[in-house]
Amino acid sequence: MIELKNDALRVQINEHGAELSSVMSVDDHLEYLWQADPKFWGRHAPILFPIVGRLKDDQYRLNGQTYHMTQHGFARDMDFMVVEHEDDHAVFQLNATAETKAKYPFDFDLRVTFELDEHTLSVHYTVTNPSSDETLPFSIGGHPAFNVPLIPEEGGFENYSVTVAPKKTYPQIPLNGPYNDVQHEKMLNLTTPMVLDHDLFDRDALILDLDHVETTLLLSTQLNDHGVALTLQNAPYVGIWSPYPKRAPFVCLEPWWGIADNVNADGEFLNKMSLQLAAPQSAFNAGYQIRFF
């Protein structure tokens, strides 16, 4: 377990999956991050790579060959190498192996950087394509889960809300089973805070189309001064999720550079919706920040 620390926060990151596992305030020992109780969901904040969401029948075709890959890809279940570590930052690296190439036949260099600055944790993804002649297609995303309520003695799930800035009505991409159904896009009015209710997630995640506009999601309650604010600079989507029908005491705010297969996907990987493309010997960069208060 790798630890970052300053006067405000102590952060723990597991080399397995480069998964953020704890964010605790130094003053009052408040744990912000979901602690992976398998009764509800046995993860904290997995990294989604090289796909976000699910493929049609957990498979795809590329150059006439069929490959199998399960939901959210394989990075979350692999051990990363720690290539840098100081009190205020750490860099984790994952490269292609024979195991990954059986599912995803590309060379890649994935680096995840965590940087702590006062009450803010920044997460940065760099996906480098080492090939000299082949484009690297992929998706990537985050899946951090936050305790709701943050203080169990002070209120419950329905006492919390998610406020989105800019305040406006957002295109919402519904899910039909595990697949996106953008053909039946809805509109979600977020000009006022969205009060949390487990029934919001009866069709899985709420997916907002951000159109790469800088967006902040504030998870908070009127019962105390604690909460989290997640800011994305250039993401096409953000997912808001809590498992249903379980009444789980957490909510995920998920920055995505990719999305599950469309209901009408033809199975060809290069036709996949919202695929990112890294040119030969170039790098893709993305990230987000979480402020804890």
Image: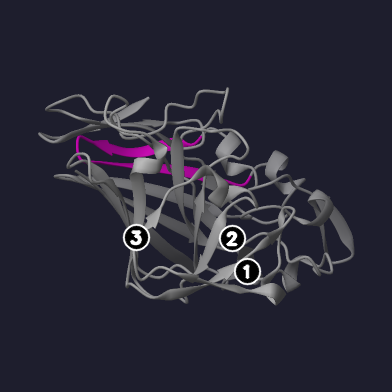
Residue 73: % across, % down: 65, 47
Residue shown at 71% from the left, 39% from the top = 99
Marker count (numbered): 3
**Mark 1 to mark 3: distance in Å?**
31 Å
Q: Are marks 1 and 2 in contact (CB under 8 Å)?
A: yes
Label 1 vs label 3, nearer the camera: 3
Question: Which residue position is annotated with label 1?
Answer: 275
Residue shown at 80% from the left, 57% from the top = 56
Q: Is residue 119 above or below residue 274?
A: above
**Mark 3 to mark 2: distance in Å?**
29 Å
Dot 3 crowding, Cα within 10 Å, few <14, some 14–19, many 20+:
some
* Amino acid type of the residue tagged 2 in the rendering: Ser
Res. 193 mark: 3
| Range of magenta residues | 80-96
* Amino acid type of the residue tagged 3 in the rendering: Pro
Report helix, strand or loop for mark 1: loop
Question: Which residue position is annotated with label 2?
Answer: 139
Q: Are marks 3 and 2 in contact (CB under 8 Å)?
A: no
Report helix, strand or loop for mark 3: loop
Specify the quadrant that holds the N terminus.
top left
Residue 18: % across, % down: 45, 38
Q: Nearer the viewer, residue 114 or 248?
A: 248
Q: Earlier in the sequence, mark 1 or mark 3?
A: 3
